[in-house]
Amino acid sequence: MKNYFSLGNSIYPYLLLNMRSGASFIRVDGPNNYRRVAGTSIGVSLLWGISRYMGLFKDPTELCAAAVRGDSSKIDMSVGDIYGGDYKGLNLPMNMIASSFGRVQNVEDTNEVNKDDIARSLVTLVAANNVIFSKIIAQSEKIKRVIWIGSHIDTLEYM
């Protein structure tokens, strides 16, 4: 069951991230006062297009369910993989992703990878990049609230 509530005018301003084929970042200052401030091609079409091209999934919901089961650490290279632990000089924890798909540079590294791991890595790549973009844009626009909407955002609640 979904619950709905209203913050009234106290919600403004906010940054609306509409993630569909790509992602659009829209500054909303009121019911009829908004403007697009940025965008990126890193969205659901990238996620879905790569997985379809690779022949991994038949529908986006299956992709999202697989991502829940997957382990992106089998595919993504972490700060710890590169530096042997935390990188204290830049305050980077060892489990932070340093390179999406960085572990599968060599053919022999792909033996333990399955499609759930690939799904998790792809979803993480798209989500993490848009979180970073959201933070940078919100700070630049001096906005405290970010709201995400768009294709298959609801399936991310299972993650």
Image: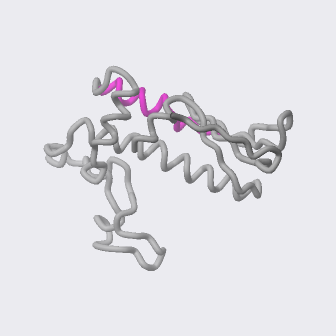
**Residue drawn at x 48%, y 50% as measured from the top left:** 128
Q: Residue at x 52, y 38 (%)?
A: 42
> For the image shown, how many numbered marks are present on the structure?
0
12 or 122: nearer the eye? Answer: 12
The percent coordinates of residue 75 (x first, y second) are 28, 48
Residue 53 percent across, percent down from the top left: 34, 24
What residue is rendered at 65% in x and 36% in y?
24
Say whether residue 127 is left or right of residue 19: left
What is the span of residues highlighted in magenta in the rendered image? 39-54
Report the side of 36 relative to 110 (left or right).
Answer: right
Can you name the residue that lies furthest to the bottom here?
89
Quadrant containing the C terminus is top left
Could you tell me residue 100's position as x and y percent? Answer: 37, 49
Question: In the figure, residue 141 lies in which quadrant?
Answer: bottom right
| Main secondary structure along the magenta-highlighted residues | helix
The reply, left or right, for residue 112 in relation to residue 92 is left
Q: For residue 132: magenta?
A: no
Measuring 73% from the left and 42% from the top, which residue is drawn there? 6
The quarter of the picture where residue 119 lies is top left
- Residue 48 located within the stretch drawn in magenta: yes
Residue 143 picture location, percent across and down? 74, 55
- Is residue 43 depicted above or below 94 in this figure? above
